[in-house]
Amino acid sequence: MKDNINSIQEYWESVGKSACPDDIIRDMSIDQIVQQLPKGSSVLDLGCGNGYCTFKFAETNIKSIIGADYSQTSVDQAINISSLHQDSIKEKIDFKQGDALDLNFPDSIFDVVITIRCLINVGDNENQLKALKEIHRVLKPGGVYLMCENTISGLQNINQARDLAGLNEIKTRWHNNYIDENIFFPRSNKLFNIIEENHFASTYYLVSRVVNAWIHSKNNSEPKYEDEINKMASKLPAEGEFSPMRLYVLKKK
């Protein structure tokens, strides 16, 4: 398993960018998380990539935020991008290289920890639990974990819809291990209370990954993330459970 983790780290070092190629779902995720950030809170953005989301969070009325990622390439990019932002934003932010499985922070230091497609990149289910325990450790009593991750059941639901439309299934990439709710949450219940489960991107996924994909298949063309129908879908109310990506609001016990 250690070899696999090293391979994943090497992959992200070589890529050196955000884990999400879909700008629309990235921005939808940010919007949902911003609504959950308490005023004056100290925040850890774990798996921050090049810091795009971290800067967006810093624009809110939080007190401070640390962006941590195990890719030094991504951390260096985030630091370089800092020069493009106002001093009032930069002074809230610090970027560090950090491993979700062994966080180099004291116990009970953060009010909020955020992950966006981070736990799916730490290897197997056991490592996800290990990362969860580290998140629990660094949160203050009653602290909040905003977990925006991809789930197996969400992927299954969207693939069932694609199958009905005659489309090929969406497969997970080699370095991703989507959250298996049947394994993850019975374990997490020992550490956290689930306050909210938000399927905010369900309609967006149904339109972008099924309807738009079906239209393009009939025209022998390739769908693009930035297609206008996808932009429209991102503004519609969320219905159903068609999105692999979900936001869980967890409170430390």
Image (spheres, rainbow, N blue to C red):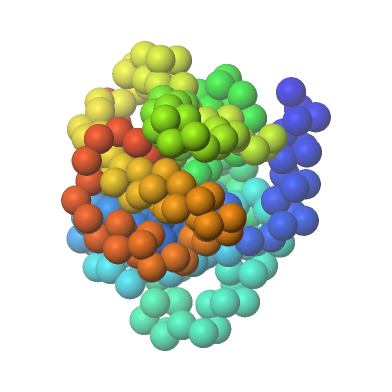
Up-down: is 159 above or below 54?
above
The C terminus lies in quadrant: top left
Residue at image point 32% right, 18% down: 189
Q: Residue at x 30, y 33 (%)?
A: 241
Pick the front one: 105 or 30: 30
Observer-nearest residue: 21 or 133? 21
Q: Would you say residue 81 is visible in this rendering?
A: yes
Q: Residue at x 80, y 29 (%)?
A: 3
Image-quadrant location for residue 227 = bottom left
Q: Residue 248 location, x and y as percent?
A: 31, 37
Res 133 visible:
no
- The relative height of residue 79 versus residue 75 in the rendered view (above or below) is below
Query: Where does the image place residue 85, in percent across and percent down from the top left?
Result: 46, 82
| Residue 29: % across, % down | 36, 54
From the viewer's side, name the closer residue of 218 and 137. Answer: 218
Q: Is residue 197 left or right of residue 44?
A: left
Where 109 falls versus 233 (above or below)? Answer: above
Horizontally, is 148 left or right of 101 in the view?
A: left
Image quarter hosting the N terminus:
top right
Q: How many marks?
A: 0
x, y percentage for residue 225? Answer: 49, 60
Q: Is residue 179 above or below residue 95?
A: above
Answer with the quarter of the image where residue 103 lies.
top right
